[in-house]
Structures are given as C-alpha cells and as structure tokens.
Amino acid sequence: LLRCLIDTTAVGNATKFCEKLNGKMTSCMYLKNIRLLCILLAACFLPIWACPQQQQQQQQFSFSTQIKNDQMDIFKRYYIEKMIDFGKVIFADSYRSPVENIMEYLRKLLEKVQYYCMEISNWKNTTLKEPCREDLSFMVCSFSDFLNGTATKLAKLCDSLPDDAKVACVEESNQKIYSNLWVIKVVDSIGKPPAGIFQGNLLFLGSYEECLDISVLRSQNQNAGEAKEGTFQGKHCSIMIHLPRFHMNTIKRLPFAYSNNKLKSDSLTEPPLQWGICMPKTCSAVDTTKLSDLIYPNASSMIKIRCEEPQALEDDAGSIVMVVIGCALAFLVIVGSAMDFWYQYKSDTSKKIVKNSHSSKNNLNIVEFDMVNQDGASHHANAVVEESYDWKMCVILSFSIPRNLSELQLINPDHIQCIDGIRVLSVCYAIFGFSVLFAMNNIDNALQAMDMISKFYAQIINSAALAADSFFVLSGFLVCYLFLNRAQLHNALDPMHWVLFYIRRAIRLVPVYVVLLGFVALLFKHVGDGPLWTGSIPSFSSQLGCESSWWTNLLFINNFFGQENPCMGWAWFLAVEVQLYILSPLLLLLYHYSPRVALAATSLLMISFAVLHAVIVVLNDYPPSYVATTNLSELAKLDAYVKNVFVKPYSHCCSYLVGIALGYFIYKMKNKPYKFSKRTRKVLWIVSLLFNATTVFGIYDYAKGAVCSAMRWSSTAKGLYACLSRLSWPITIAMIIMLCLNSKNCFVNRWLSMRMWKPLSRLSYCAALIHPMITATLLLTLRESFHVTICNVIYNAVSVTCITYLVALVVYLCLEAPLSKLRIDILSYDNLADSFTLKI
C-alpha cells in the first residue's frame, strides 16, 4: 500500500496531470480518489502486533486478525505492483472509446479461444477419451464461432461490403451468434470469485442446474470443431485447488508470536479453494484431471477434481435391495393397519348388537386385553375374536399404525418420568451441536465463524459433545435399576436370565441399526445432488469406508477399527454403549450381593478412568475435550483426539459408572424412602448448576485460542480439565435425577415429567442415529455456501431437529415399535421385565 501511495504521487502534481488529460476533470478526480482510497486502506490495515513485549498486559488476538494480517502482508508484497500497472493501463487508454476497449478485449480472447480450438483438435493421441475430446473441441470451437460473430457485429465489418455480400455476412454473423448462445450458459455456469474472499469465502460453486440443463444437438452447429451427430450435455465438476505455498518465506518473516511453524505455512493454504466448472458429460473426473495437466503441466499435483457422475438407481443392486426392504415394511404397515381397522370395526359392530339384543357374552367372545408397550405402559384395546390370535396375526398387527401411535403417547405411572425430559433435551443438544459443527464445512465467512467460537455464549454449543455423557448416565442407571428389581424375583445367577439379558438388548438395538446402516451404505448416495454433494457425509461416513469396514459396525467395534474411512461414524456412541453393557454384569452382581464393595469399586474405577483420560491428554498434548478453538495448532489435534480418545469406551466409563451407582441409590430409596431437607435440596441444586456451568464455560479461555505463550493452556491445565470434566458433568446429571425423584413437586421435575416428553423420548434412539443424515442432506444439497450468523445457525438447527423427529417417527412406526412389541411378547420372562425399557 505504501508502494501505491508512492506510485500515485510519482505520477506528478494533480494539476499537471489534469493538464495532460486536457481538462478531463473526471479522470483527474478519479486519480485523487485512488490516492484517498490507498490512504484509507493503509489506515484500516495497520499491523497490530500480538503480545508486545513493551506491555505488561499481553494482548490476545483472534484467528481472524492473524489471517487478515498475513493476507495483507502478501497483498502488499506481491499483488500491489500488478494493480498499479493495471491502473496505468487504464489511464493510458483513457482516450479510447468503450467500444474500442471491448473490441481489444474480444480480439485477445478470440485469439486465445481459437488457439485452444485448434490445439484440442490435435490432442487425438493423448490419454483423453475420444468422446470427451470431441465434445471439448465442439464446446471450445462453438465459443470461438460465437466470439467471431459478436466481434463482426460490434466492429460493423459487414457494413463495408457490397449489398449482396453484406446480407450474407450479416446472416452468417447472426447464425454464429444465435446457434452458439448455449456456450454462454456454459461460461455463465462456471464459478466466479465472489465477494468476501478475505473473510474465508473460497467456494466458487457456479450454477449447478444451469450446467446440467445444457443439451444441444451437434447437428445444429456443423461448423464448430468436430461436430458430429448426437447431443452435447453438460456435467458439473468441482475442482479443489490447494494454493501453492509461494508465500511461505514471507510468512516466516512476520513478527507474530505464533507457537507452531505449521501454522505459519498452512494458514493461507487451508482450506482449499473449490471452483465449480461445466464440462461435457462424456468427460470424467480423470479426463478433467488429464486436461488440466495438458493445459498447465503438473497442475494435478495441487488439485483434486470431482465430477457429478450419479449411478442410476436401477443399475445399483444394493440400492434396489434397500428399496425392496422399504417397500416390504410399508406393505406390512398398510396390511397391519387395515387389519386393525377391520377388527376395530367388527368390535364396534358386535358391541352394538350385544347391547341392542341384550344377549349374553357367549354369542361372541369380546376379549379385552392389555397391550404392553416398551415402557411398560399398558392400555386396554377391545377386539372381537372367536379364538386367540396365532403368531402370524400377532406379527401383522404389530405393524398397525393406530396401535403404535396410541402406545407412543401412553404413560406408565411407575415409570421414572423425569428421565424422559432429560433424554429428549440431551438428543436436541447433540443435534444442535452436530448441525453447527457440520455447517462449518461449506461456509462463506469462515473467519467470522472462527471468531464466533471465541464468544462466551458460543461455549454452550461448543460443549455439545457432553450430551453423549448424559446418554451414558441414563443407560447405566436403567441397566442397574432394572437388574436390581428383577433380581428380587429371580435368581441373579440363573443362566437363562443372562441369556435373555443380552438377547433382548440385541433385538432392541440391532434391527433398526442394521437397516439404517444399509441405507447409509447403499441408498444415501441417491438421496441428493448439487455442487457440494458427494454421496457421503464428510468426516463421518464415506462410500469407501462402508465398502471396507461395514462389518466393524455390525460387531460394534467401529470405534476401534476403520477410523480413517468410517461408515456411519457417528454411531460410535452405540458401540461404546454395547461394549459397556456387555461388561456391566460384573459390577451388577457385585451390587446385588455386596453393595458396599460395589460402591467402593465404582468410586475407584471412576477416579482411575478420569485420571487415565487426563494422562492420555497430557502425554499426547491433545485438546482437553471435544471442543473447537480458534488456535489452529490446537484445532489440528482435534481429529486425532476424537479418533484415539473420545470414541473409546474408557473415555465414557465414568458416566456409565455414575449411572450404575445412581441406579443403586434410586433402588434403595424406592424401598426405604428418604427425603432431603429443603435447605439440602437448595444447596444440591446450586452445586449441580454451578458444576454444569463450570464444565460448559470452563473451556472459554481455551476456545478463544490464545497465541501468546503466557496465555495458552498448558498441558497440566488441559489434563486437569480433561479429568474433572469426566466426573463433573455425569455427577450433576445424576444429582438432577435424584433431586427430581426426591421432590416430585419441584418445578424442574414437573417440567421434565410433562407428557409431551414421553413420545419424543421413545423416538430418541432413532433420532440419535438419523440426525446426521438429515443434517448432511439439508446442507450438502444447497446450491450456494452457508453463511454463518446466529439466526441462520438457530434456524438450521431447529429445522434439522424437527425433520429428524418426523423421520424418526416413520422409522419407529415401521420398524422399532413392531420389533419392540414382538420382543416383549416372545422374550418376556415376567411382568416386571415388561414394565421397563432399556433405552440409550
């Protein structure tokens, strides 16, 4: 910018320059405005160095400020000279008319396009596929004809010809223009640099539909290149461009007090630029990559090309299988609902006949039976039968929508109702956090979004991963509580008891999980399209991962294997829950036979796993938790922390153990009620809320991403938070449940026990598995980048939550509810087992 000031000053005095322009004051004022703009820019981007040694209070700057300063330094050193040269060209051509300038531009563009038209025709011996090369030749040469006709009309070359030749010239020019207008759609659909590049907008997506809508008969333009019979169609491709590190030496000279050299070299090269282009349909991503090497040698080393190449559904055997399964379930639902309506109709008709004729019940057997749902809530349903249903009819009626909907809303008085509200709020918290995290992949204001992370209120969303520990607390609580109740009536060492313990859980979890896994692996790629759509869910699930590691999901070991290319990677929580559930009998038997020893063992294990988590964080210099930060050197370690620590069972053992201990205490309070005093309840509420707030907002300084060594979190600080947060959050959740049960008239318990939570709670398992697919579908099918603001984030999260529960309702009615009913009917070994459900 200083060079800009010097250069504009070197032009000379403003008065002398105006005299050179022969009094053209507009141009003169334009130069003055240029000088003023340079001064303003220089004032706006004065470097503010972080951590000055002269100040006792070291100042901390955000990621956005660092990048802006880096960018402006490079801007000053490398690009300002070109901008000044361009300005000189503009002033030097001030005497030329706009038409002359346009004609000069068209002439240069036409020369370039004609060169490539001839060059592509000579690429017959290259590695490009012949159909692709022919379509490229047709497209480029058509653009050449269009420019030729346009230049002819603008220059009025036909006017100088005789009348007969003039008419032919005009007709030829018009024919070249109007028969090749489709080429303008190709050019228009290509992505252009948008506004806000300095704010991180590196998505030049172009117009997806405009490119795909291009369909031209080659016979309409036989003059263009190697035009043959057939149809030219467009295909949208995305080029991921990793910018060359030409600026590395410049960044190393910057006086910022960065803590990591990798930050200096990668700050302006990540994320890559995504550029949308329109290619012939006959060209694949491989052809496009080879084309880039032909135009710019070795260009493929810094780019990655992806083209829209959808596979037809009818040609995909796996997708057809999933469609057949879906149709079969839909058929069972329709038949089951119809049969249920028929029996209800016969029941109502029979009742009227019996009432009017005053006949005895021996004429028709009107049986009133209890339908026990998965939470043990029963309701009465009338059916007219002449004999008991056989197993086939039971299977069909289990798919009845009316019955399943009625059971969805039932409440069992013996059920611990406050956990319904906690479960639903935890699911919504997880959905909200995931939707915000996933939205950060394709945004046009990345630097502003990074700055938002450093806000104090943003830590509510930044800590959304804590919702997973709420699930494990509830799961451990229900496992222990239900086991102790059953152990009162049956021998706890009975082998059949433990066989059913595992079989019932498998039937509860596996069918829904397998169907959704098959949907993600086989059918999800056909759900959407667009410039951002890849058929996968970036960072969470990939087609390659589903092809190679699907078996790890079925064995519930996907949190140990297949982490590099995961399939349905968000299902790690299910793998952890199953692994902890398998090991839980060792501690459950101890609680049944020796509660004091069990409590001591639980306490020791909780402390041990919390310390283990801290040790792993300190030794590997991992982040303290699954939270984002504006410090890039720390953010780069987050992926390794998630794969190596967060998804492992030992990171969530504390929550599960707290839940098991809570189940024991609630069981004892059920047999020997104990009421806390009013003062004790107040103290416990205050302590639990303080612990919760400390866990959520205690990460604030880390999230701000301090770049000064004196203000960064040390390994000891990260280890301390990693240890305490493993204990504080589950303990506060357990305290809230206990306080709600101890004082059922308190406002929190009444709110968490409201009837509206019950149906949503029953949908929680499906919602937890479905919401990443809904989030990805909504965001990756956008035709433009996502702009992060508080309103947009809330709107997106609420939309994802509502749609997730609607889809979860469909899955529940078609799959989960019928199987749960069959599981209870077939595997129930006593009424107590039917009165509870083990939900995540």
Image (cartoon, rainbow, N blue to C red):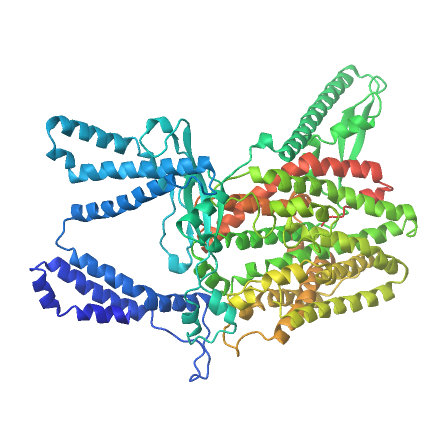
Q: Position of residue 638 (x, y in %)?
A: 59, 63
In the image, what residue occupies the spot 42% across and 33% down?
Answer: 233
Q: In this view, does 727 lie above or below 758?
A: below
In this rendering, position of residue 527 left or right of residue 269: right
Q: Position of residue 552 (x, y in %)?
A: 72, 49
In the image, what residue occupies the spot 68% across and 63% down?
Answer: 732
The reply to whether residue 107 is in sight is yes
In this rendering, position of residue 20 left or right of residue 516: left
Q: In this view, does 39 lie above or below 555?
A: below
In the image, what residue occupies the spot 92% across and 52% down?
Answer: 493
Q: Where is residue 681 in the image (x, y as percent from the top left)?
A: 70, 65
Q: Is residue 305 above or below residue 315?
A: below
* On-image quarter of the N terminus: bottom left
Q: Position of residue 169 (x, y in %)?
A: 18, 30
Residue that lies at the very extreme toward the top in this rendered image:
357
User: Which is more toward the observer, 369 or 120?
Assistant: 120
Total marks placed: 0
User: Which is more toward the observer, 438 or 500?
Assistant: 438
Q: In the rendered image, which quarter is residue 147 located in? A: top left
The reply to whether residue 412 is in sight is no
